[in-house]
Image (cartoon, rainbow, N blue to C red):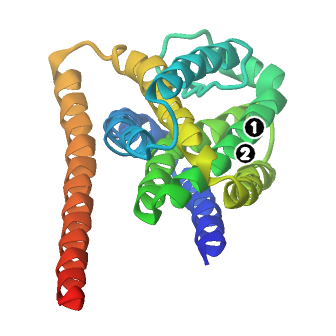
Amino acid sequence: MLLLWILISTITSGLITILIASWLTYKVFSKYLNHMVSLSVGILLSVGLLHLLPEAYQSGLVNQRILFSLMLASLICFFILEKIDILRHNHHYEGDGHGHLEGYDRRKAGRGGISILIGSSLHNFSDGILLSAAFFADPLIGSLTASSIIVHEIPHKLSDFVILRNAGLKLKRSFTLIFFSSLCSSLGALVGYFIFQEHQNFVPYFLVIASSSFLYIAMADLIPQMHEQKSPIETLPQILFVGIGIIVIYSITNLIQNHHIHDENHYHVTSSLCTK
């Protein structure tokens, strides 16, 4: 049953992001991208710091010093991956107002279209493994992780569409290529499921890696984009949408904690009655 939920989450999240990305137009993309980036920052930071990391540290399965060391190593690895163009989230497109010369993004897309697909496939595969770990820790945490991936991946997939279109690919072919790239997350989820089924003590390590991934993307990729808008009129909506993302995840965190406390109290009361 858990495997079914994991596969449903990976497939539906991929379809949702691709359908929304293919539906949006350049004008809509230009108008709402900054808000989506800000919302993603709030959600990624909150899920990473309020759910994934606490779940890993509270598992009690491994030494916390090892988990912190893994977190440091993960952040450095993500930096290296970004340097070699495997982990890159380019949200620019032809005529996006960033001051590039005409044809800049088109030429860049022509050189990098294939590498974008390879990088996205590897990224989706790793997302599938990390999502599987989150579901093994707690189905609610898995659902939150899937939701945060969807929110962040919408502008990412949209930028993939724009890059491939700038490279000369038709919309239908771009959709097909990106769809097969997104299926790599299901493949990663399958690999993760069979790994964690036999070795559940690996789950805290992958939760730390997932958290590190969310933190790195938010801090090194998305927040620098937010700094490109410097006027107070542009900054206030950014703060608002970051706050909305944090409030949503924080509220869900409280609901989960209250649910767990209620279940534990019910268990203790039932146990005491049974002993009497």
| Location of residue 33 (image quadrant) | top left
* Residue for point 25% across, 30% down: 238
Residue annotated with mark 1: 122
Q: Amino acid at mark 2?
A: Phe
Is 230 or 115 nearer to us in this picture?
115
| Location of residue 244 (image quadrant) | top left
Q: Quadrant of the N terminus?
A: bottom right
77 left or right of 264? Answer: right
Q: Position of residue 49 (x, y in %)?
A: 34, 35
Residue annotated with mark 2: 125
Residues at discs 2 and 1 in contact (Cβ within 8 Å): yes
Other-residue count near label 1 (Cα within 10 Å), few / some / many at <14 / 14–19 / ≥20: some
Other-residue count near label 2 (Cα within 10 Å), few / some / many at <14 / 14–19 / ≥20: many
Q: Position of residue 91 (x, y in %)?
A: 54, 28
Distance from Cα at disc 2 to Cα at disc 1: 5 Å
Q: Is residue 51 above or below residue 76?
A: below
Residue 103 visible at all: no
Q: Position of residue 139 (x, y in %)?
A: 46, 65
Q: Is residue 3 above or below residue 266?
A: above
Please give the count of numbered marks on the rendered protein: 2
Q: Amino acid at mark 1?
A: Leu
* Residue for point 53% across, 25% down: 66
3 left or right of 24? Answer: right
Is 21 or 151 nearer to us in this picture?
151
Residue 111 visible at all: yes
Q: Quadrant of the C terminus?
A: bottom left
Is 159 or 106 nearer to us in this picture?
159
166 left or right of 137? Answer: right
Outermost residue toward the front in this view: 276
The local secondary structure at tag 1 comes to helix
Q: Position of residue 140 (x, y in %)?
A: 40, 63
* Residue for point 74% across, 32% down: 119
